[in-house]
Amino acid sequence: NAGVTQTPKFRVLKTGQSMTLLCAQDMNHEYMYWYRQDPGMGLRLIHYSVGEGTTAKGEVPDGYNVSRLKKQNFLLGLESAAPSQTSVYFCASRTWNGVNTEAFFGQGTRLTVV
Amino acid sequence: AQTVTQSQPEMSVQEAETVTLSCTYDTSESDYYLFWYKQPPSRQMILVIRQEAYKQQNATENRFSVNFQKAAKSFSLKISDSQLGDAAMYFCAYLNAGGTSYGKLTFGQGTILTVHP
């Protein structure tokens, strides 16, 4: 039982390059999220999904795209990376049993765009 | 739009003392949850406590308790008998459990807590 796994853990990109971050969860959760964490800014929501095949924009969606083709995977894409996208990215998935709920997070991906 | 505000970038407390971290939120929804998460230097996110908006009773988890003021849209975290292991970044979070932004989970800016021995 791995929980939430993010791939890769570290990456350095050149400006203009593209990449995809993979988030995989083995807990059968419906809800999944992508955040970025920057000093003094807290965790800012990029995109989220409330079920397989669904996606919705968060607070800072520009420059990112997402897909949720399979329930267990939530992909975050950067089509043309910019230095402003240098950040630590966190994925989360969330339980929901009709009463209680809790979000579980991956270990984070440190992305540097040069 | 839902927003979460933590107005204290940094707080400090002496070991064994009590500290309160502040959080306010803005929403027009009636169905929601509030959380406090802890992030130690390892970057792992750990759930500290959860509050359902429909419950009037404040949630407690051992040394951690909240003061949930629904009308004021305030959700503070009290840590009693502070321990060195409590040192971390603390995030307040809001989950929309209904309405057009159903499932949206928003975090505040975080408060860095330092515990002095």
Image (spheres, coloured by chain):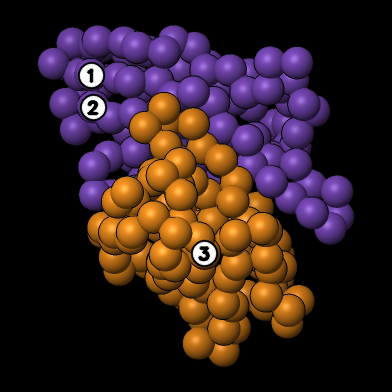
Chain colours: A purple, B orange
Position of residue A29 relative to residue B10, above or below, is above
Q: Chain of mark 1?
A: A
Q: CA distance from mark 1 to mark 2?
A: 5 Å
Residue A48 circle label: none
Q: Answer with left or right where residue A4 lies relative to residue B91.
A: right
Q: In the image, what residue type sits under mark 2? A: Thr
Residues tagged by mark 3 and mark 2 found on one chain of the structure: no
Q: Which residue is mark 3?
A: B80
Q: Residue at x 52, y 17 (%)?
A: A6
Q: Answer with left or right where residue A72 lies relative to residue B106.
A: right
Q: Residue most toward the left?
A: A114
Q: Which residue is mark 1?
A: A112
- Circle 2 crowding by C-alpha within 10 Å: few under 14, some 14–19, many from 20: some
Q: Which residue is mark 2?
A: A86
Q: What is the secondary structure assignment of the residue under circle 1? A: strand
Q: What is the x, y in percent for residue B98?
A: 71, 65
Residues tagged by mark 1 and mark 2 found on one chain of the structure: yes
Position of residue A49 relative to residue A86, above or below, is below
Q: What is the x, y in percent for residue A105?
A: 56, 32
Q: Nearer the viewer, residue A46 or B10?
A: B10
Q: Nearer the viewer, residue B16 or B23?
A: B16
